[in-house]
Amino acid sequence: MEKEIRILILEDVPARAALMEFELRRAEIPFISKTVKTRNDFVRELHDFAPDVILSAYYLPAFTGSEALAIAQEEAVHVPFILVTGELGEEHSVEILKKGAAYVLKDNLSKLPSILLRALR
């Protein structure tokens, strides 16, 4: 059996996290996930859960996915970071890519499995 991918999901809407998981299961990607909603939980789970990849909403109640990326980099967690966003203007998408993250649009989640596997390579 393939090793399960450890996925940390930063998302404040449980249904959105469930949709991400659904797309990965549909693509038959073996994984275990942990979903967090707050900055404190995110920082804690970066170390306690030790993810192989991070999926993050862009807009959260207390901070942004861009800030979460910076936190992961500050905490020296060198794992792929994928923003899952409703829409991302050209300026933001270029900024995210320059910072080393990937992104997928929420209305095109069927692309998440291929983006995730590419990011892990």
Image (spheres, rainbow, N blue to C red):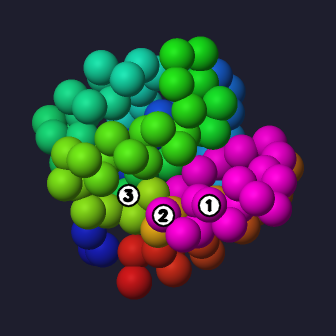
Q: Is 48 drawn above or below residue 28 in the view shown?
A: above
Q: Nearer the viewer, residue 95 or 49?
A: 95
User: What's the CA distance linking mark 2 and mark 3?
Assistant: 15 Å
Q: Secondary structure at mark 3?
A: strand
User: What residue did someone put label 3 on?
Assistant: 53
Q: Which residues are magenta?
A: 82-99
Please tell me how crowded label 3 is: few (under 14), some (14-19), or many (20+) other residues with Cα within 10 Å: many
**112 left or right of 90 in image:** left
> Where does residue 41 sit, x and y in percent of width and height?
31, 22
Q: Quadrant of residue 53?
A: bottom left
Which one is closest to the eye, mark 3 or mark 1? Answer: 1
Q: Is 93 drawn above or below residue 41 in the view shown?
A: below
Is 93 within the magenta? Answer: yes
Q: Can see residue 26?
A: no
User: What residue did someone put label 1 on?
Assistant: 95
Please tell me how crowded label 2 is: few (under 14), some (14-19), or many (20+) other residues with Cα within 10 Å: some
Q: Can see residue 60?
A: yes
Is 85 within the magenta? Answer: yes
Q: Is 19 drawn above or below residue 24 in the view shown?
A: above
Q: Secondary structure at mark 1?
A: helix
**62 left or right of 68 in image:** right
Classify the position of the C terminus by image quarter: bottom left
The amino acid at mark 3 is: Val
User: What residue did someone put label 2 on?
Assistant: 99
Q: Nearer the viewer, residue 28 or 65?
A: 65
The amino acid at mark 1 is: Glu
**58 left or right of 70 in image:** right
**For marks 2 and 3 on the same chain, the one whose residue lies earlier in the sequence:** 3
Q: What residue appears at the point 47 percent right and 68 percent down from the top-left corner?
A: 100
